[in-house]
Image (cartoon, rainbow, N blue to C red):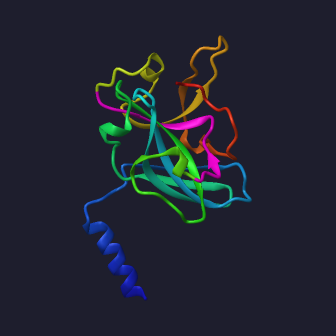
């Protein structure tokens, strides 16, 4: 048994992959367990689409997620900023990285008011993105009281919350 574990560890280290970004956050509904995925919303495309990148799992009131690579150009908006909501799928299910149809997702949880932001080097981005460093960061939604588009502000990643899927959420696009 120890030899199998050692071989698995060596295989994982020798394939050249590493974690680019990862963190632990909160699951609001502790009665549900599942896998967690990153869903980059590409809002500057017509039509808007989702790009899955990142995998994790839940244990009790927490989840973990890791992104093994920076998002490819297909996962970020034309302004160089990518915004990923975290979705929770039932059980140990997951889907391959890449463009995914919303109708193919069986989400039981979503980070409705928090997100992962990826800012590409030299990104123009919307005005709110100037408060984010290049690379990965976590964010919370800031409601626009005038009825315009909501924005994001940086937060510690431990405050990212996956909760039951409901209507509404951050109206950033």
Q: Nearer the viewer, residue 146 or 155?
A: 146
The quadrant of the image that shows the N terminus is: bottom left
**Magenta stretch contains residue 166:** no
Q: Which residues are magenta?
A: 106-121
- Whole-percent x and y of residue 110? 61, 45
x, y percentage for residue 162? 63, 46
Left/right of residue 103 with respect to residue 10 in the rendered view: right
Query: Which image quarter: residue 61?
Result: bottom right
Q: Where is residue 15 drawn, in percent x and y?
A: 26, 65
Residue in the picture at 49% in, 60% down: 94
Residue 48 in the figure: left or right of residue 140: left
Task: Please name whichever residue, 151 or 45, is drawn nearer the observer in this view of the structure.
Answer: 45
* 62 up-or-down from 43: above or below: below
How many numbered marks does the figure carry? 0
User: Compared to 115, does 57 lie above or below?
Assistant: below
On screen, 113 above or below 123?
Answer: below
Which residue lies at the image location 52% right of the left edge and 51% below the top edge? 104
Q: Nearer the viewer, residue 122 or 43?
A: 43
Measured as percent of width and height from the top left, residue 14 is found at 25, 68
Q: Is 109 colored magenta in this rendering?
A: yes
């Amino acid at each position: 048994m120890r030899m199998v574990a050692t071989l698995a560890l060596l295989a994982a280290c020798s394939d050249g992959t590493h974690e680019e970004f990862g963190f632990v956050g909160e699951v609001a509904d502790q009665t549900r367990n599942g896998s967690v995925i990153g869903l980059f919303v590409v809002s500057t495309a017509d039509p808007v689409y989702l790009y899955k990148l990142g995998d994790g799992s839940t244990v009790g009131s927490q989840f973990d997620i890791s992104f093994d690579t920076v998002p490819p150009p297909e996962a970020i908006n034309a302004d160089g900023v990518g915004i990923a909501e975290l979705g929770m799928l039932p059980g140990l299910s997951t889907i391959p990285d890449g463009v995914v149809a919303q109708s193919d997702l069986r989400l039981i949880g979503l980070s409705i008011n928090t997100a992962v932001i990826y800012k590409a080097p030299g990104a123009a981005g919307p005005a709110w993105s100037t408060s984010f460093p290049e690379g990965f960061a976590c964010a919370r939604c800031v409601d626009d009281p005038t009825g315009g588009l909501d924005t994001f502000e940086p937060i510690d990643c431990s405050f990212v919350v996956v909760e039951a899927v409901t209507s509404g959420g951050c109206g950033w696009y």
